[in-house]
Image: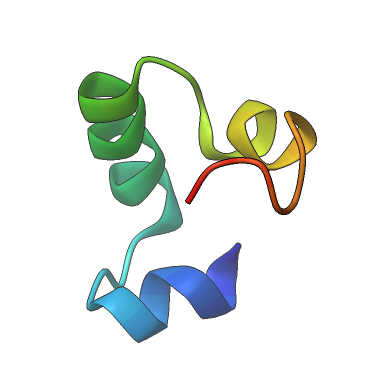
Amino acid sequence: MKEICQQVGYADPNYFSRIFKKNVGVSPTDYKEMGEGNHG
């Protein structure tokens, strides 16, 4: 998670998580657990 945040330009994982959930509707953790190759 931390590496992903840095790769997409967010220094704060908590901020990234909040923005991600706002846009996608689920937390990054839940999104990941939905299936590694099933979303794009």
* Residue nearer the viewer, 27 or 40: 40
Which of these two is toward me, 9 or 23? 23
Residue 7 percent coordinates (x, y): 37, 84
On-image quarter of the N terminus: bottom right
How many marks the image carries: the answer is: 0
Height in image: 12 above or below 21? below
Q: Is residue 5 left or right of residue 4?
A: left
Residue 38 in the figure: left or right of residue 7: right
Which residue occupies 40% across, 40% down? 17
Q: Is residue 22 left or right of residue 33?
A: left
Query: Is 7 placed above or below 10 here?
Result: below
Question: Height in image: 28 above or below 23?
Answer: below
Say which residue appears at 32% left-offset and 31% top-offset. Answer: 18
The image shows residue 39 at horizontal and vertical percentages of 54, 42
Residue 11's spot in the image, x, y percent? 30, 73
Placement of 26 over or under 3, stated as above or below = above
Residue farthest top in this picture: 25
Residue at the location (43% across, 56% down)? 13
Q: Which quadrant of the structure image shows residue 34?
A: top right
Counting from the top left corner in percent of width and height, residue 6 is at 38, 81
Color encoding of the figure: rainbow
